[in-house]
Amino acid sequence: MVHKKIPALIAFIILIALIAGVAFYAGRHSGFTPARFSRGMEQAAGEKPAASPGPQPPPGPLTLAAVGDVMLARKVDRLLQEQGPAYPLAKLGPTLREADLTFGNLESPLATTGTPVPGKGIWFRSRPEAIQVLKDGGFDVMNIANNHILDYDTPAFLQTMDLLKKAGIEYFGGGRDLDQARQPVVVEVNGVRLGFLGYSDMADIYWSHKYPRRFRATDTQPGIAPLVVDNTYLVEDILQDVQKLKPAVDVVIVSLHWGTEYQRTPSDEQRQVARCLAEGGVDIILGHHPHVFQGLEVYKDSLIAYSLGNFIMDQNWSRETCQGLLLKIEVAEAGWQQAEILPVQIVEEQPRQAEGKDAVIILSEVQDLSKKLGTGVEVKEGKAILNREK
């Protein structure tokens, strides 16, 4: 049999097509431009880069999915070992993966190293294999500025950051020193550039006089970016970070681990801080820590979610701690446009979209809590809608 040789040009075209096909299917989301990430102000500082020569598609809207506390230790870890890594997000994983960008607060370190910080009383640590839950859930960016990420001290904290980086999941709000902890993550999706910063109001606390390990980073100690030091909100420091970031991005998002556990309303001081940040150029504030959801507020065109509540968590001892919010925020070059609020019900540590009576209760409470913050939320067809112009 005689084999005809394929001309070099045709072979080259086929090779290019194959490479393009592999690149397309390797992306997590179909039908959109894959996100491009950069870390640190050395890459984010300055004006946005000029567009490439030639016709460019206009920056298109994107969907940002945002959830609250993601805790993969304790009972969640036991279920992971029994049921496998697909279990926690079997119901809502597809919804998260459909978004162009997905955010959550990582409430537990992923490590085999470290020892419990003395005196703390509640310690979380997940096995490194749990990183698969985050990957399968399509998480792109995660806040690590919270009161559990250093439960097993510096070694586990460093291992966690390394695991996230290796998995292709960007983190912010923590680092190997204070400068790194305050650095943003910059993401570009569909031509829109978003910058993320994270802080915790419990970074300055310690639990043992014999080992006064505060979680906040210093010039020489790894840790997280503080929101409060010596009982004072560091609003000016955060606004400095925002002003450095703002020229390089279209949208500034600040993640805050703050507030009082199990309280359904933010404090007056929290609202003052949130409004100062909004006036200083923050477009979206994503809050967490109370383990229950709170109302949303629109202030000077900024979207403020004071607490998204639990998402993956084993606090199944009350109705409120088994419920949360999943935000699907439409974001454009001009900022956020609309927020779709999905009610979340956690059943045996597995979040799912609430239905029936559960959905009615959650959405009614979201509406009432937001109304108390001066913001109207429209409830319809099993979800709530919040528009920027309202």
Image (cartoon, rainbow, N blue to C red):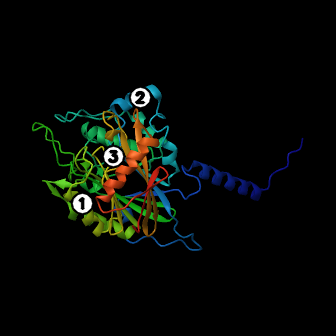
Q: Label 2, secondary structure: give it.
A: helix
The quadrant of the rendering that contains the N terminus is top right
**Mark 3, secondary structure of its residue:** loop
Q: Work out whether mark 1 precedes mark 2 in sequence or the reverse, and give the earlier one.
A: 2
Instruction: Tell me the residue at 17%/42% (across/down).
Output: 213
Q: Residue 377, position in %: x, y?
A: 39, 59
Left or right: 172, with 208 as reference point: right
Q: In terms of depth relative to the viewer, which is nearer, 243 or 137?
A: 137
Q: Position of residue 242 (x, y in %)?
A: 30, 65
Is 129 situated above or below 224?
above
Q: What numbered label is drawn on residue 271?
A: 1
Image: 365 above or below 376 = above
Would residue 353 be visible to someone looking at this image?
Answer: no
Alpha carbon separation for disc pair 1 and 3: 17 Å
- x%, y% of residue 243? 30, 68
Secondary structure, mark 1, is helix
> In the displayed image of the protein, which residue is found farthest to the left?
209
Query: What is the CA distance from the residue labelled 1 to the residue labelled 2?
Result: 38 Å
> Mark 3 to mark 2: distance in Å?
21 Å
Dot 2 amino acid type: Leu
Q: Which residue is mark 3?
A: 309
Question: Which one is earlier in the sequence, the residue at label 3 or at label 2?
Answer: 2
Q: Are marks 1 and 2 in contact (CB under 8 Å)?
A: no
Q: Quadrant of residue 212?
A: top left
